[in-house]
Image: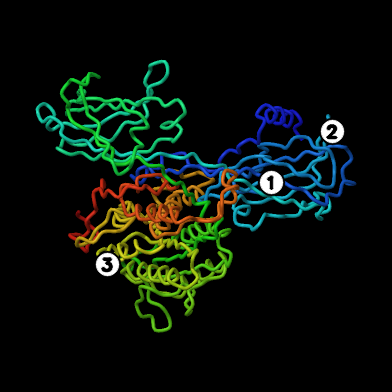
């Protein structure tokens, strides 16, 4: 045992006077927007859990010294031998019952679970000897009610020497202010064909300016509605009541910038009655007698209610995974020896994060693009286990069903995705409509395909239909011919067909071949693929839940809310409904997956829509 390392950790812990935050397990080394063209706006705030330990019925006769210490290790590469000590508890007097508050903090993420080990050690000044240990996943703490309890196992005998109970407290998240500005009456002369944008500064006590936000640039118009933006609440409404300066600029094709005008305001002005029009005049310089060069209207200035994926999970909402495998081939001579192995690896890696969220361990599994026994008629939707019930028990049962189908079905030359998407959409909607489904499950459909879609128009219409259901769809292409899947999966919900549009973003796309080319020798390849495939699911789930009136009620894990009344007033219900109604505003979809519930009813869409109405049925797509 490395005593020098342990002493360093103990000294650092004493200096911090708090439990350390463990390093994140995510191994992703690339910008989220670099591979798939999607904005990183939806990169989420963090759910930080403060972990508390309670050891009971400890067999103290197994310890030779008077003191005990616990070592906390993290598994880095999913191998049993790859444990790394990251922190320790303080040195504790030996007793049969021990309680330790805020031992450490850890980030909870859905896309990749964190595997931790706690070792209880006999401790002296010169020696630390491991006596017992236990391992657990962070998700187990979150999903186990009321608290996770596991035996501490003695290293030598393999028998239980104590019971370890692990509880947590979620750190309160920072409150946020949502703002949106609208510019009007800009002078035409000199500003036509230029891009208009603004910057917002906070005036500090030493008369310096601190840049808070730079807006998006929009082409000159008589009315410009910039994208909404968010600022930390303590930045806007601190006790010192600082002023804020907004400067509006124009920029031409040669990137030459000029000031249109500016104004100074306060948080009191921004937050006055929402029904009043908050109009501020742009002037060159700060003299009020100068002619206004336009006006800025504050159309949104509201506190944002923050809900997280964790809030829904601890309130009993669950995730349900369905798998669909495309068996089709482009022609009779098309054979891919690695396809079956790739599908098995994808299924295992995608299912792993759901395993601890799925208490029944049932996974719906389908196949399409094949001729199925006994009559070998072409089918675009069949149960992967070739039975009447698509549910498979456990990940191994799902894998067995795939290999059974792979051995018995005959690949067809066409793959139609629409049947599976319609089926899962209706299944998810029907589950939601059942009585007593106050905490309805959210479905995730992973479609594993070689990439070619032979019914692109029908698939687009099915996707638009599915956007109303509690469903996310992940397209996973195992081969290079995936242009249709890529265009559809990376549309970020901006798809339409004959003037019908998707109601929200519920798609994601991952190309296995492209990912493999970028990370050819990475030991964490499948974990990284899973992170990429699932990274938007929590935000998409929260988006649907909020739009459909599902708000987490049980906030017992938040210290700041422990003393609040459990009753809900009529005014609170009105405010809650107002927040729910606000989710029909597409402008809120640019925000983090945990930050929602604007109270504005303005409707404005900034994103261009991907129109598939004119799409050719051939693989070559045109917008």
Q: Which residue is mark 1?
A: 117
Of 562 and 219, nearer the camera is: 562
Outermost residue, top direction? 206
Distance (Cα) linking label 2 and label 3: 70 Å
* Residue 377 vertical placement versus 460 (above, below): below
Of 40 and 344, nearer the camera is: 40
* Residue 153 vertical placement versus 251 (above, below): below
Q: Assign the N terminus to one quadrant of the image.
A: top right
Residue 124, numbered label: 2
Q: Secondary structure at mark 3?
A: helix
Outermost residue, bottom direction? 375
- Asked if residue 313 shows in the view, the reply is no
Mark positioned earlier in the residue sequence (3 or 1): 1
- Asked if residue 568 shows in the view, the reply is yes
Of 574 and 607, nearer the camera is: 574
Q: Which residue is mark 3?
A: 458
Residue pictured at 32% horizontal, 25% vertical: 245
The image shows residue 75 at horizontal and vertical percentages of 63, 45
């Amino acid at each position: 045992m490395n005593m020098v390392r342990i002493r360093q950790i103990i000294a650092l812990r004493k200096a911090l006077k708090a439990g350390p935050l463990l390093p994140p397990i995510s191994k992703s080394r690339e910008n989220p927007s670099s591979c798939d063209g999607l904005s990183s706006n939806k990169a989420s705030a963090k759910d930080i859990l403060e972990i508390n330990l309670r050891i009971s019925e400890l067999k103290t006769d197994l310890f030779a010294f008077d003191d005990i210490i616990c070592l906390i290790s993290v598994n880095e590469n999913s191998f049993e031998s790859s444990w790394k000590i990251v922190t320790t508890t303080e040195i504790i007097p030996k007793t049969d019952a021990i309680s330790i508050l805020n031992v450490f903090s850890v980030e909870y993420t859905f896309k990749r679970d964190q595997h931790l080990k706690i070792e209880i050690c006999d401790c002296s000044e010169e020696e630390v000897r491991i006596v017992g240990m236990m391992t657990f996943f962070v998700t187990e703490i979150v999903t186990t009610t009321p608290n996770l309890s596991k035996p501490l196992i003695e290293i030598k005998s393999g028998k239980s020497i104590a019971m370890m109970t692990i509880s947590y407290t979620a750190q309160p998240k920072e409150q946020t202010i949502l703002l949106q500005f609208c510019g009007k009456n800009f002078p035409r002369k000199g500003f036509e064909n230029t891009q208009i944008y603004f910057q917002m500064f906070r005036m500090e006590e030493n008369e310096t300016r601190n840049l808070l936000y730079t807006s998006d640039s929009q082409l000159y118009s008589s009315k410009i509605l910039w994208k909404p933006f968010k600022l930390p609440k303590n930045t806007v409404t601190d006790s010192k009541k600082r002023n804020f300066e907004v400067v509006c600029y124009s920029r031409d094709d040669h990137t030459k910038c000029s000031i249109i005008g500016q104004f100074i305001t306060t948080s009191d002005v921004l937050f006055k009655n929402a029904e009043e029009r908050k109009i501020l005049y742009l002037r060159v310089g700060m003299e009020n007698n100068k002619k206004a060069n336009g006006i800025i209207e504050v159309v949104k200035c509201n506190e944002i209610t923050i809900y997280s994926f964790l809030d829904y999970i601890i309130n009993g909402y669950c995730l349900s995974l369905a798998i669909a495998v495309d068996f089709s081939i482009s022609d009779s001579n098309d054979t891919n020896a690695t396809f079956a192995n790739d599908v098995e690896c994808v299924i295992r890696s995608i299912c792993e994060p759901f395993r601890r969220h799925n208490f029944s361990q049932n996974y719906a599994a389908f196949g399409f693009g094949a001729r199925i026994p006994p009559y070998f008629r072409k089918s675009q939707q069949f149960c992967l286990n070739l039975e009447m019930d698509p549910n498979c028990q456990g990940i191994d049962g799902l894998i067995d069903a795939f290999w059974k189908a792979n051995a018995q079905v005959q690949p067809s030359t066409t793959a139609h995705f629409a049947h599976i998407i319609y089926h899962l959409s209706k299944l998810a909607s029907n589950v939601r409509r059942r009585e007593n489904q106050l905490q309805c499950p959210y479905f995730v459909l992973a479609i594993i395909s070689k990439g070619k879609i032979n019914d692109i128009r029908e698939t687009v219409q099915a996707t638009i239909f599915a956007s109303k259901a509690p469903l996310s769809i992940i397209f996973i292409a195992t081969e290079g011919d995936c242009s249709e899947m890529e265009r559809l999966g990376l549309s970020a919900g901006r798809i339409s067909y004959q003037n019908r549009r998707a109601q929200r973003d519920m798609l994601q796309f991952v190309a296995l071949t492209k990912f493999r080319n970028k990370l050819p020798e990475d030991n964490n390849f499948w974990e990284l693929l899973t992170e990429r495939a699932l990274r938007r699911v929590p935000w998409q789930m929260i988006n649907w839940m909020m739009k459909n009136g599902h708000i987490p009620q049980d906030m017992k894990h938040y210290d700041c809310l422990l003393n609040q009344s459990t009753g809900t007033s009529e005014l609170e219900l009105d405010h809650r409904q107002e927040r729910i109604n606000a989710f029909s505003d597409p402008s809120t979809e640019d925000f983090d997956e945990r930050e929602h519930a604007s109270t504005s009813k303005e409707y404005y869409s900034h994103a261009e829509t991907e129109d598939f109405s004119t799409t050719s049925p051939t693989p070559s797509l045109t917008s």
